[in-house]
Image: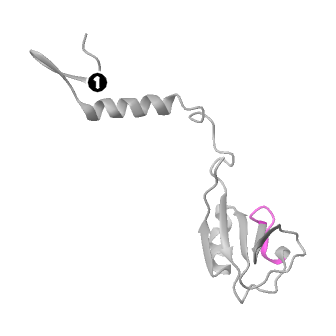
Amino acid sequence: MVQPWMMHAWPMVTCCPTTVGAQMIRDSLSESPYATAPRFDFGKLLSLTATVGENEGGKRVRDIERDGLIKIAAIRRDASVIIAKADETLRAGDEINAIVAPDALADFGRMFTTTAPISLSA
């Protein structure tokens, strides 16, 4: 019997390694427990890190956050990480982790010296 991964040219049947590899990858992905699970945020949010510059130093977290658009989750300062509170004062050099909606991405990027997406692992 000729399998889908076999190439058939009369009178011989050969096996194409590329096709076999692609089929194995497809089968592995289709059996993945995550294949049908939607992303937690449905692709609507970004988790970003940013470095607080001189212009933002001295501002409070509540001055940076935008209701429903930007939420600062954590602040890395010196050798520690703290959960951000609305009344926390940011310092130049602090690294913040923020959840940002696409509508606020440009504004958030303009506020900080360096902004980059972070990789989350489950």
Q: Report the amino acid beneath label 1.
A: Trp
Give, as a single range, the part of the protein colored magenta. Answer: 63-73
Q: Secondary structure at mark 1?
A: loop
| Residue in front for this viewpoint, 98 or 94 | 94
Q: Quadrant of residue 38?
A: top right
- Asked if residue 69 is among those painted magenta in the image, a careful observer would answer yes
Furthest residue toward right? 87
Q: How is the image coloured?
A: one colour
Which residue does the image show at 84% across and 79% down from the upper left? 60
Q: Which residue is mark 1?
A: 5
Question: Is residue 79 shown above or below 10?
Answer: below
Q: Is residue 28 left or right of residue 59?
A: left
Q: Is residue 20 above or below residue 53?
A: above
Instruction: Characterize the local packing of mark 1: few (<14), some (14-19) or many (20 or more) Cα atoms within 10 angstroms.
Output: some
Q: Position of residue 71 (x, y in %)?
A: 77, 65
Image coords of residue 41 (percent x, y): 68, 49
Name the residue located 88 percent from the left edge and 69 percent from the top edge.
Answer: 85
Q: Quadrant of residue 62?
A: bottom right
